[in-house]
C-alpha cells in the first residue's frame, strides 16, 4: 500500500528528517514550510536529497488560526493526488511522530480499507466556545494579524466590536450541516479526490472560509460529513494527543513520563513533540518501534 504523509511545519528540520527516515519506500512526503520560517533553502534541499519521494512548498504565511493553514493542507493534498498509486493520505504537523512501524500502517489500513479517520461533531457544540459559530459568523483576522505576536489582542477586540455593532456574517452553506473537529486526519485517496473535485465544481466554496478561525477544523469535517463518504467516516483521527498544559504548551509537549501511554496507544501518530523536552521520549519511541 502506498501512502502519503502531508506535513505542515515551520521549524525543527532534524525532526522532519526523523519522520521521513522512520518510513519505508512505500511512503512519500509532501511538506509545507511556513513562508516566514527561518529554515534555510539549503536545509530544505537536504530533505529532498534523502532518497525519498519528497515535495516541498513554501507558498503561504501560516499564522496560527488563519485560513492559510487550510489552503496549504489542500495544496499538499492535491499534489499527492497527482500520484495515482497513492492509497491513503495522512495530514500531520511538524511536531508529530509515528507510533507504529510502516508494516503496521499497511496492515491497519488494509484491514480498514475505505474508511475515513477524522474527529467530527456537529455545530453548534458544547466543546467549543459559543458553540463554535463565532468562528464563522464574525471576521477573524488571523491571517492579517499574528495572534502570537505583539498585536494579537486586536483580533479579539475587533470581534467584540462586530458583536457590539451587530455585524454578523451569513452562515450560507447551501443546506449543509456544519461540522467541526481536529485538524489532523487519515483519508483515502477516493475521499481526497472527492474533496478536490468538490472544490473544482464549487469554486466559491473555499472563499466562504476566509476570515474564519481555524478553518481547517471546519472544512474537512463539513465537506466529508455532507458527502457519500459520511457512511465511511470513523470518529477517530488516530492521533494520541494530551489535552492539558504541560511543558509550556496545550496540547502537552510530551516527555518521558508519557512513554508508557504512548507505547500502549492504538493510534498511528502522537503529538506534540518539542525540543529539547521531548528528546528523551522520542529516543525511547524510536528504540521501541
Image (tube, rainbow, N blue to C red):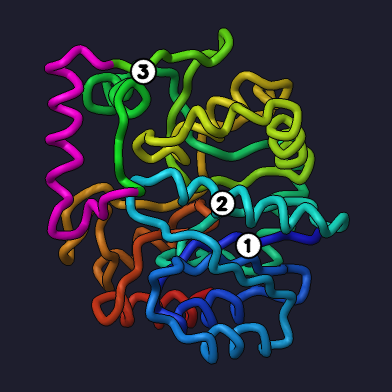
Instruction: In this rendered view, identify the residue nearer to me: 194 or 119.
Output: 194
Residue 201 x/y as whole percent: 75, 27
Q: Residue furthest top?
A: 175
Residue 174 x/y as whole percent: 58, 11
The residue wearing badge 2 is: 73
Quarter of the picture holding the C terminus: bottom right
x 27%, y 73%: residue: 256
Q: Residue furthest right?
A: 84
Badge 1 vs badge 3, beta-carbon distance below 8 Å: no
Horizontal relation, residue 110 to residue 284: left or right: right
**Numbered mark located on residue 5 in the image:** 1
Badge 2 vs badge 1, beta-carbon distance below 8 Å: no
For the residue labelled by badge 1, is the local secondary structure a helix, a strand or a loop?
strand
Per the rendered image, the range of residues in magenta is 144-167
Q: Nearer the viewer, mark 3 or mark 2?
A: 3
Mark 3, other Cα within 10 Å: few <14 / some 14–19 / many ≥20: few
Amino acid at each position: 500500500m502506498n501512502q502519503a504523509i502531508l506535513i505542515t511545519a515551520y521549524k525543527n528540520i532534524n525532526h522532519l528528517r526523523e519522520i521521513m527516515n522512520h518510513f519505508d519506500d512505500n511512503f512519500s512526503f509532501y511538506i509545507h514550510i511556513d513562508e516566514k520560517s527561518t529554515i534555510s533553502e539549503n536545509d530544505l534541499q537536504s530533505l529532498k536529497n534523502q532518497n525519498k519521494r519528497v515535495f516541498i512548498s513554501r507558498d503561504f504565511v501560516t499564522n496560527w488560526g488563519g485560513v492559510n493553514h487550510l489552503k496549504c493542507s489542500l495544496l499538499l493534498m492535491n499534489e499527492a493526488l497527482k500520484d495515482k498509486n497513492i492509497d491513503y493520505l495522512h495530514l500531520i504537523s511538524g511536531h508529530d511522530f509515528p507510533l507504529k512501524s510502516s508494516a503496521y500502517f499497511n496492515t491497519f489500513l488494509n484491514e480498514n480499507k475505505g474508511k475515513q479517520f477524522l474527529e467530527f461533531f456537529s455545530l453548534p457544540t458544547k466543546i467549543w466556545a459559543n458553540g463554535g459559530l463565532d468562528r464563522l459568523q464574525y471576521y477573524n483576522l488571523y491571517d492579517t494579524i499574528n495572534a502570537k505576536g505583539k498585536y494579537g489582542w486586536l483580533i479579539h477586540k475587533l470581534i467584540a466590536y462586530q458583536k457590539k455593532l451587530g455585524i454578523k456574517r451569513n452562515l450560507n452553506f447551501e443546506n449543509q450541516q456544519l461540522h467541526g473537529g481536529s485538524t489532523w486526519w487519515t483519508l483515502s485517496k477516493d475521499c481526497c479526490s472527492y474533496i478536490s473535485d468538490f472544490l473544482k465544481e464549487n469554486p466559491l466554496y473555499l472563499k466562504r472560509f476566509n476570515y474564519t478561525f481555524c478553518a481547517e477544523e471546519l472544512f474537512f469535517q463539513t465537506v466529508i460529513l455532507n458527502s457519500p463518504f459520511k457512511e465511511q467516516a470513523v470518529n477517530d483521527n488516530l492521533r494520541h494527543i494530551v489535552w492539558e498544559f504541560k511543558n509550556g504548551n496545550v496540547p502537552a509537549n510530551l516527555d518521558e513520563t508519557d512513554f508508557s501511554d504512548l507505547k500502549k496507544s492504538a493510534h498511528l501518530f502522537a503529538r506534540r513533540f518539542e525540543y529539547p523536552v521531548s528528546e528523551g521520549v522520542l529516543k525511547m519511541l524510536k528504540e521501541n518501534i
